[in-house]
Amino acid sequence: MAPGYVIAACFEGTGAIGIVVALRLLHAEQRAKAAELARFLRSGQVPDAPKVKVVAEARPAPALRLGPTARPARA
């Protein structure tokens, strides 16, 4: 094989190994975060969810009253 192909194959292998290492690090970090969250939730220090306070309720729109002075809509 020509030296260029050998160098390219080495770069390909190095890149593949780098991707595998990065994925394993991300997976380990995710597992550590999940374990920390589980530990926190089991500790009982989780505050209650805030209560939802209804300020106003939706009202239906008032009915339109057409009096004797109302003009019919033009088509």
Image (spheres, rainbow, N blue to C red):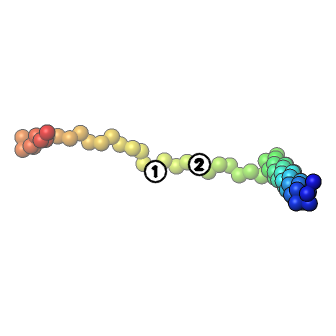
Amino acid marked by disc 2: Lys
Q: Is any part of residue 21 visible from this angle?
A: no
Nearest the eye: 72 or 65 = 72
Q: Secondary structure at mark 2?
A: loop
Mark 2 → mark 1, Cα distance in angstroms: 12 Å
Q: Is any part of residue 19 visible from this angle?
A: yes
Say if 19 sits above or below 72 in the image: below
Position of residue 24 measured from the top left corner of the image (x, y, whole percent): 87, 51
Label 1 packing within 10 angstroms: few (<14), some (14-19), many (20+): few
* Res 51 label: 2
Position of residue 36 measured from the top left corner of the image (x, y, whole percent): 83, 52
Q: Is residue 59 left or right of residue 27?
A: left
Q: Is residue 61 left or right of residue 57?
A: left
Amino acid marked by disc 1: Val
Position of residue 38 measured from the top left corner of the image (x, y, whole percent): 82, 47
Q: Which residue is denoted by mark 1 in the rendering? A: 55
